[in-house]
């Protein structure tokens, strides 16, 4: 495949309909439909199913789209880095964050940003909070995320509060307190951040207000080193609640009164953020506020930033395509990488010779040379230079080779996964059955089927109703057999093979489910968990016995029928399974609860001819299931 085809699949997934996707991709809908059909034929499985007039990915489809995202991310990183080392990048944003932990935030938002703006380089600059305003004002950085005080020299948007807590050794007498006043720690040694750090600036003011100078036994710019010393119970310290993790050696206790510091987005005063800067700021806000330990500060500017990233994520911006860039800035989108061609070019790099690579690939040297020339023209950079009749890889070529290998590896893994999935389904016929029936089917259906089709292995697996329906929809099984109160489904062909009714089976004569008084016996025996019947039993019990009920037994249907009457517990069973029970103990619900056993297949899926025979066998056996 090539990156354009992966882009098509992502666009279909994001926009949900072929008509919307074809407009965004500027191709005809029949052409896109033909492409999708060809892809599904190649993979051997449907990638999408139609539901409520929208296309939803199947299980294989979700996996392929995940791989497509990885491949396009890799391609964009490759082009961005190649242009950066070659000095060709015209767009760059320098982002300042706090040292150490800022790099973690950067890694979380990098992929999504580079998808949206693949031709904009993102450079991380680590600066303490008190250094950020000056760096922004001087033009050294464009955008900053940091804590501390609000600055008047830059545009400063507060986005969240984070509480500061005391990290205290578990052996300390105050370690069991619910709150601590700072003055109570005047005789305890401290481990503190350096005076550049926003927490230290705030701590020094708190010490002054508390009326003492702390005994500082360790001090560092490195917050990770500070964390390590505190976790070893070397002393007490102030840490942000958003950066603590459980530790056996220390306790984390809030101050009394509570102390908070603000987290800010900062940029140049009176500057209007560019689309790329605004999107980056919105990603930073979303990432931080996604942590429940931060308390959001809601204002118009923060809400506008959050709306920016939501619109992009949902594909609501008409100028935004699924591959992640603005259509009018689609320079990187125009570079298409055929995976097979990437393999050719990597071979040239490995062999350091066109002729040797051509021999290895069984290609004509002129054809290989043409592929190389086309790729260099496409990306606008030389991958090789010739010195003393030998090919030398340029810096851009070295970067190209690294990312090309990653792309090839991702596609090979994808194809291997699909091949194994396909192998697991060839020569086999898959039936997912309600757990209450699966053992009976394995014993009886399998033997009868083997007599008719000895060359096909019948796989009967027990599953919940939800799993059966999901598996039918994503075409990972052939048919499903399950109980349900609703025999119809928009995307399934359901054949009803048994129509029954759920009835209340009482341990006492003439005790009906409508008698909800204190004398009623609310002890119940239920079907095993993860069965359809158990879900339906629990729903009815919750409706008719909402106050209190006790589950005293979980058992299969034959055991439930034997136990009823031998204990003082009740149950709920399909009427067909209750024929051996005293009729005076069976009572319908009001309104009656219809219950069906159905064989489900997916609408539009072409099933093998053996399906007809399997359905006949199941219908024939169904009359014996209840005995």
Image (spheres, rainbow, N blue to C red):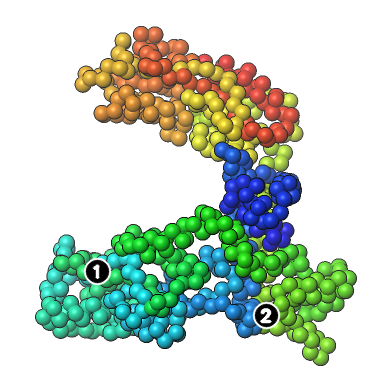
Above or below 169: residue 493 = above
Above or below 571: residue 461 = below
Q: Which residue is mark 1?
A: 260
Q: Nearer the viewer, residue 88 or 578?
A: 88
Residue 105, image quadrant: bottom left
Residue displayed at 34% across by 81% down: 153
Q: CA distance from mark 2 to mark 1?
A: 48 Å
Q: Which mark is residue 441?
A: none
Residue 543, position as x, y percentages in the image:
33, 26
Residue 129, position as x, y percentages in the image:
34, 79
Residue displayed at 83% across by 73% down: 370
Residue 592, image quadrant: top left
Q: Nearer the viewer, residue 38 or 141?
A: 141
Residue 286, position as x, y percentages in the image:
41, 62
Q: Secondary structure at mark 2?
A: helix
Quadrant housing the N terminus: bottom right
Residue 358 in view here: no
Q: Secondary structure at mark 1?
A: strand
Q: Which mark is residue 396?
A: 2
Mark 2, Cα crowd under 10 Å, few <14 / some 14-19 / many 20+, is many
Mark 1, Cα crowd under 10 Å, few <14 / some 14-19 / many 20+, is some
Residue displayed at 15% across by 73% down: 182
Residue 212 in view here: yes
Residue 621, position as x, y percentages in the image:
60, 19
Q: Nearer the viewer, residue 115 or 23?
A: 23
Above or below 600: residue 45 = below
């Amino acid at each position: 495949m090539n990156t354009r085809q992966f882009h098509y699949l992502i666009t279909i997934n994001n926009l949900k309909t072929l008509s919307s996707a074809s407009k965004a991709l500027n191709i005809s809908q029949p052409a896109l439909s033909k492409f999708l059909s060809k892809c599904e034929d190649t993979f051997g499985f449907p990638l999408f199913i139609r539901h409520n007039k929208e296309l939803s990915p199947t299980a294989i489809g979700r996996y392929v789209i995940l791989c497509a995202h990885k491949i396009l991310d890799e391609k964009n990183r490759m082009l961005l880095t190649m242009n950066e080392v070659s000095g060709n990048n015209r767009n760059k944003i320098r982002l300042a964050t706090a040292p150490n932990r800022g790099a973690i935030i950067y890694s979380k938002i990098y992929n999504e940003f580079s998808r949206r703006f693949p031709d904009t380089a993102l450079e991380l600059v680590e600066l303490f909070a008190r250094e950020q305003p000056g760096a922004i004002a001087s033009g050294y950085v464009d955008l900053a995320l940091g804590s501390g005080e609000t600055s008047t020299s830059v545009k400063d948007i507060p986005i969240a509060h984070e509480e500061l807590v005391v990290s205290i050794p578990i052996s300390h007498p105050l370690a069991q307190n619910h709150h601590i006043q700072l003055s109570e720690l005047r005789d305890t040694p401290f481990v503190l951040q350096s005076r550049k750090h926003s927490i230290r600036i705030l701590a020094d003011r708190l010490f002054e207000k508390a009326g003492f100078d702390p005994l500082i036994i360790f001090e560092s710019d490195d917050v990770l080193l500070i964390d390590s010393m505190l976790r070893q119970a070397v002393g007490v310290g102030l840490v942000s609640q958003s950066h603590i993790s459980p530790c056996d050696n220390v306790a984390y206790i809030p101050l009394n009164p509570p102390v908070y510091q603000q987290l800010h987005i900062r940029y140049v005063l009176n500057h209007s953020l560019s689309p790329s800067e605004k999107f980056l700021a919105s990603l930073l806000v979303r990432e931080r506020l996604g942590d429940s330990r931060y308390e959001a500060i809601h204002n118009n500017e923060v809400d506008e930033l959050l709306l920016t990233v939501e619109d992009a994520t949902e594909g609501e911006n008409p100028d935004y395509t699924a591959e992640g860039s603005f259509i009018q800035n689609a320079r990187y989108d125009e570079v298409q990488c055929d995976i097979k061609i990437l393999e050719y070019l990597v071979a040239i790099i490995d062999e350091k010779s066109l002729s040797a690579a051509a021999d290895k690939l069984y290609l004509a040297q002129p054809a290989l040379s043409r592929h190389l020339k086309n790729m260099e023209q496409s990306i606008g950079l030389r991958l090789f230079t010739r010195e003393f009749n030998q090919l030398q890889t340029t810096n851009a070529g070295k970067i190209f080779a690294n990312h090309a290998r990653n792309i090839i590896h991702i596609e090979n893994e994808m194809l291997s996964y699909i091949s194994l999935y396909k192998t697991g389904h060839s020569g086999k016929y898959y039936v997912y059955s309600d757990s209450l029936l699966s053992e009976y089917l394995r014993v009886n259906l399998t033997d009868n089927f083997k007599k008719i089709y000895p060359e096909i292995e019948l796989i009967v697996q027990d599953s919940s109703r939800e799993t059966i329906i999901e598996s039918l929809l994503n075409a990972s099984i052939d048919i499903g057999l399950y109980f349900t109160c609703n025999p119809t489904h928009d995307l399934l062909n359901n054949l009803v093979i048994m129509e029954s009714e759920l009835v209340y089976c009482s341990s006492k004569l003439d005790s009906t489910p409508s008698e909800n008084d204190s004398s009623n016996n609310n002890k119940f025996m239920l079907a095993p968990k993860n069965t359809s019947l158990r879900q339906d039993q629990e729903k009815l019990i919750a409706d008719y016995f909402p106050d209190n009920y006790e589950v005293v037994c979980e058992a299969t249907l034959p055991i439930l029928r034997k136990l009823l009457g031998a204990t003082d517990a009740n149950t709920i069973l399909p009427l067909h399974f209750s024929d051996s029970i005293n009729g005076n103990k069976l009572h319908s619900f009001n309104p009656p609860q219809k219950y069906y056993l159905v064989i489900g297949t997916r609408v539009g899926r072409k099933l093998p001819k053996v399906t007809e025979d399997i359905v006949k066998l199941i219908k024939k056996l169904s009359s014996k299931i209840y005995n």
